[in-house]
Amino acid sequence: MRTLRETLFLNLWIKHYGFNVKKKIIFLILLLNFTNIFCIDEISSKDTLNFEVQWFPQAQFAGYIMAYEKGFYHKEGLDVNLIFSDGSSSPLDNLLDGKTDFCTAWLSQAITSKANGGEIVNICQVLHKSSLMLISKKNRNIQSPQDMNGKKISLWSGDFSIQLNAFFQKYDISFEKIPQSYNIYTFLSDAVDVTSAMYYNEYHKIIQAGINEDELTTFFFSDHDLNFPEDGIYCLSDSYQSDRNICEKLTFATLRGWEYTFQNQDESLKKVIQYCEKYHLQTNYSHQKWMLKVIETSLKYRSGKNRSKWGKLHKEDYQMVGEILREQSVIKEIPLYEDFYKRVKVTNE
């Protein structure tokens, strides 16, 4: 069945040119191009795109929040439904199950999914510097990785454990593993010698709990040749092939959102706090401000201040993460970089 646009185009052609065989062929070629042009506009303006990030609202996702709130997605013709995960399901799994159209995920998660048959692609690597770390109190006398031998160390499981395991293997550390929840109470109560933390989150919560920075010894994985890029934007391979224009628009609007966030931090943080309150999350302005500062450093790491350079997944980072995943038998083969990462336009300037 022809669309209204196709019917109007057909009537105009017949009126002015007639409709012999040769002209019919020309018409069909033009009609195909004509239809494809408007097809993208119809998808963009009609369909709602579900975009899921990995966790509850916080400054880690301020750029997506502001892209939505300032209408940057809408200006690109996109109707975006921003979804916050509560940890009960994986955004990548939801993407593969068709429940979402785009999601954010750590690079290690995504490589594992791709290697196991998940037909996904990275269209924008947002964060480049790892925030994962280990923390000890100085009174535990842990000054080097080797000093962790025989100690009690609380660790997260799943995707968070990959860098941790690589660190312990690198320095041949034997220790007592204590399962870690998503709070700092075990560390504060001295039940463990070392704890896992995200620099933008748990580390600052420890400071806010009353422990001075000079009372802590920190081990950043990015300082030990284990810098795993974290949040990136993913979609299905088929979606990229069929709707590349939409992928470009979503990426462009998202990075505009991050640029606006960094240039208008007070406004953006107040909006993040509003989202946190909506979800009944306990937080404060100071903590979210710290988080945003760390996120900005990670986003601009190796990319600088120019938005046109943001969002690139560097091949050497990809290969390093892939090789560690293979060494730990998480994957058998590293997917080809060219099949995994699809660079899209990030600026219209």
Image (cartoon, rainbow, N blue to C red):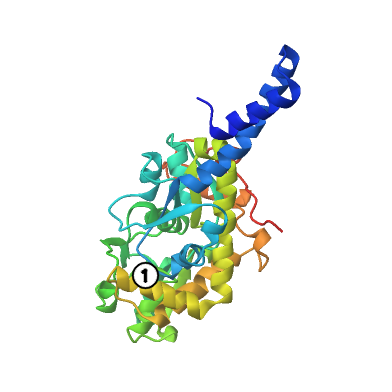
Residue plotted at (66% across, 69% down): 305
Residue 153 drawn above or below residue 231: below
Residue placed under numbered mark 1 in the picture: 275
In the picture provided, is 292 more to the left or to the right than 10? left
Q: Residue at x 59, y 52 (%)?
A: 313
Of the pair 222 and 151, the residue shown nearer to us: 222
Element at label 1: helix
Q: Position of residue 160 (x, y in %)?
A: 38, 57
Quadrant of res 164: bottom left
Residue 291 place in picture, x, y as percent: 45, 73
| Image quadrant where residue 262 sits | bottom right
Residue 228 placement, left or right of 25: left
Between 28 and 186, the one nearer to me in the picture: 28
Q: Amino acid at mark 1?
A: Tyr
Looking at the image, can residue 325 be seen?
no
Identify the residue at the far top of this view: 21
**Which residue is farthest front?**
15
Residue 295 location (% of width, % of height): 51, 69
* Circle 1 crowding by C-alpha within 10 Å: few under 14, some 14–19, many from 20: some
- Image quadrant occupied by the C terminus: bottom right
Q: Position of residue 163 (x, y in %)?
A: 44, 56
